[in-house]
Each structure stands twice: as C-alpha cells, then as structure tokens.
Amino acid sequence: MTTPSVSLATRLACALHAAINSMLQFAARLAWREQLPAEPKRVCVWRTGNIGDLVCALPALAAIRRTWPTAELTLLTSPGKRGAPGAKELLADAEWLDHLWVYYRDELSLRGFARELRERDFDLVVRLPQNMSTPWLELRQLVFLWLFAGIRHARNFAVGNLLWLGRGPARALAKSRNIEHEADRLLRLVSEYTVTAHAAEFPLPLTASLKAEATRVLDQHGISSENLLCISPGAKRSTNRWPASRFGEVARRWIEDGGRVLVLGSEGDHALGKEIREIAGPGATNLCGQSPILLAAALIQRAQLLASNDTGAIHLAAAVRTPSVVPFSARDAPDRWFPYFSETTPEHSRPIVHRRSPACSPCWLESCPNENRCLTEIPTDQVWESARAVRDLRKADSPAPRIAV
C-alpha cells in the first residue's frame, strides 16, 4: 500500500513548528548557561490543567522522580479558577510527591508569586507546557523565571501547535503523520535529562482504603464487577458531548445483556446521569456528584469497560488499564488526546475510539455552529457494537481493535 503524500502546507507547518521550538530552546540555553546539576536537591515541576492534563503528565513526572529519587519534588499547578478539578483531587495523597503547590489564575499576584519562588529556592524548574501554549507565553514565562524569580535552572519551553497563527496553519500541522500523544510529547520533553522506563507509568495514588471504598460502593448497590459498565456522560466543553440519550441506550442494551451500569461524573452531571438511568432502567445507578475523582478511578478499575466522552475519565481508565469506548469529538487533532496505550498495554485493555472527520475539523471551538455534527453522526449502534465486542473479548482474553474511524 502506498503512503499518502504530505501536502506542501503541512510540510511548511511542520518546519515552522520545529523552528519555533528550536528558538525557544536556544533562548532557554542563553538564559541558563550553567550545566544542569547532576543531583538537584529541590525540583519543581510546573504543569497546569485539569484531570486529563495532569494524568497525561504523570509519565513525565514519574520519569523525573525516578531520575532524582532523593530530591524534594514539588508540583506547581493550577486548575484555572477556584473550584475547578485538578491536582488537589488527583494527587493530594501521592506519596512520591513531596509538595503540592496549587494557585488560581484569577487570584494570582505576579510579585508575590515571584517572591515565593525565590523563597523556595528551587535548584531546577521543569516546565510541562500546555499543548495550546504560544511563543509569546513561553517567552514571557522564561523571562519571569529567569529575571524576576531568579530560578537557577529551567527547562522545557515549547509550543504544541500553531493555532495562535490561525486555523489554517494549525490544521496543516494537524495533518502531519507525526502527531504525538500528549503523554508522549511531555515524556519527550524530559527525556533529554531523565531516565524513562520502557513503558509510560501512571502512578495514581489508589490506596488500599480507596479500593476498599470502591468495594463498599459496589456492595451497597449489589453490583458485581464481572459485567460492570461505567459511563461518563459529561465534558467541560459542549463540543465534546455525545448525547446523553445515546449513552442511555447503550446502558439499556448492556443491562438487557445481564450487566450493570454506574454513571460517574461531577455534581453538574447529575441531570445527565438521571436521564441515562431513566432510559436504561433500574440496572443503572447514578453516582454523579457522589464519586470523587480517585474513587471514580477505583470504580473504573473494577469495571469491564468505560463508555465516555472526551473528558478526564478516559485518561483515568487508560491509567488503570480499563478499556474505553469513546465517541470522540473532532474539535482537536486526532491521537493527541485519545486514551493512552503503549505496546506493553494488553490487547484486551486497549481503547476503541469512534471519530469522524468532517470538512470543518479540527475547529478548536468551545461551541459548535453545526450542531456537533462530528459527534451526532456517530450512531448509537456503532458504539454499542464496540462495547459488546470489548466485553466479549475481555471475557475471552483476546485482542480488541483500538481505533474505529
């Protein structure tokens, strides 16, 4: 089979993207000319975002911890505004992390922020930049860390796409055959100076007490994990939401085949969970608003399958090696935010992603003017058949396909 040719626009976009990142790396080398200390005593990792952003950063964090096992490790992070889910909900009990420093962007004082960075006296700041960062933001943070915060060493100033130039260049780059998964991108950024394992690690703090709590929840509702389907119908953006009524139909068919269903999500997803339960019947239990992030991860770990939108739950499922079936929005480039798997992931634990590619994709919009065509065109029957196939293949411990486009 012949390999499809790459357009001139895509080649130019890839060259521009590489050149910008090379210039950012050069600027960092000029600012911090001294050699990186072999055994830094205090290391700060700066990664912002919500649950999915942080789960995708876990392999890079694990590599940093493995490289400097005795260093005092701090995670500097922000979920955005106060009340948004983030590292507090995910990593507060992580024993491999020494300090969790959470700030909120709308409450941030740059002068106080710089002063506290100086007082903490970090030997090294490792940035794990967001995929959507811009060159201007990267340079601003470089100058802030170097000039105002007086950081001794800092690494990793990079942009992940070209959206800041407009959708045309960003779409051209998205058509490249070299798009990295976010977890792989962050691992690559730290691989120059860290020891990375053969397979990405996701050190979620799923303690014995959390697993016991998951068992208690299942026992309370009379649910066995042998034929359990978890559903996560929420998403931060409307452009990522497959209709709840279709999740309800998948749940109804799963229950008719002898299974049970748990609907997981935040308090804001409770109405979606209620709609799914009304369609699916008494075999579905709505735990939206009653399942904190790590408890949800422990419950997903016990399930045969997760059916979910593009949201943090799919990354939790990948971390605990539970397969997922995902009707995936085309608002972003393919692959980057798919549920993660590697060559060491057992075949029967790999995800199946359903993604359409209409002419308007990727759009990077927060709301869709075309009634979410890329999602609504994914039929219920297709998602159900994938769910049933994964269930049967897991029982047989046989390979499952990964991507259904």
Image (cartoon, grey):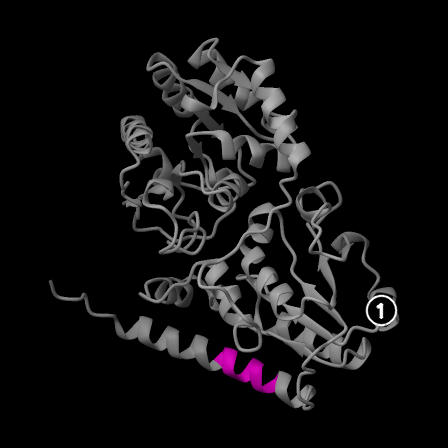
Query: In screen coordinates, is 68 left or right of 113?
Result: left
Location of residue 172 in the rendering, given as x and y in whole percent from the top left corner: 35, 66
The residue stretch that appears in magenta: 20-27
Type of residue at label 1? Answer: Arg
Residue where numbered disc 1 is placed: 120
Would residue 76 be seen by someone viewing this image from the given angle? yes
Q: Quadrant of residue 350?
A: top left
In the image, 120 versus 7, the foreground residue is 120
Residue 22 among those drawn in magenta: yes
Q: Residues within 10 Å of mark 1 (few under 14, many from 20)?
A: few
Query: In screen coordinates, is 21 left or right of 392?
Result: right
In the image, 160 versus 390, the foreground residue is 390
In the image, 55 versus 16, the foreground residue is 55
Residue at image point 64% right, 45% down: 205
Q: Tell me: residue 77, above or below residue 216.
A: below
Q: Quadrant of the C terminus?
A: top left
| Callout 1 secondary element | helix
Residue at image point 69% right, 86% down: 32
Location of residue 367 in the rendering, given as x and y in whole percent from the top left corner: 50, 42
Residue at image point 45% right, 37% down: 309
Residue 247 among those drawn in magenta: no
Q: Tell me: residue 136, above or below residue 344.
A: below
Query: In screen coordinates, is 202 left or right of 267?
Result: left
Total labels: the figure holds 1
Would residue 233 be seen by someone viewing this image from the given angle? no
Location of residue 403 in the rendering, given as x and y in whole percent from the top left corner: 30, 46
What secondary structure do most residues of the magenta stretch adopt? helix
Q: Tell me: residue 345, above or below residue 156.
A: above
Q: In this view, which residue lies farthest toward the left?
A: 1
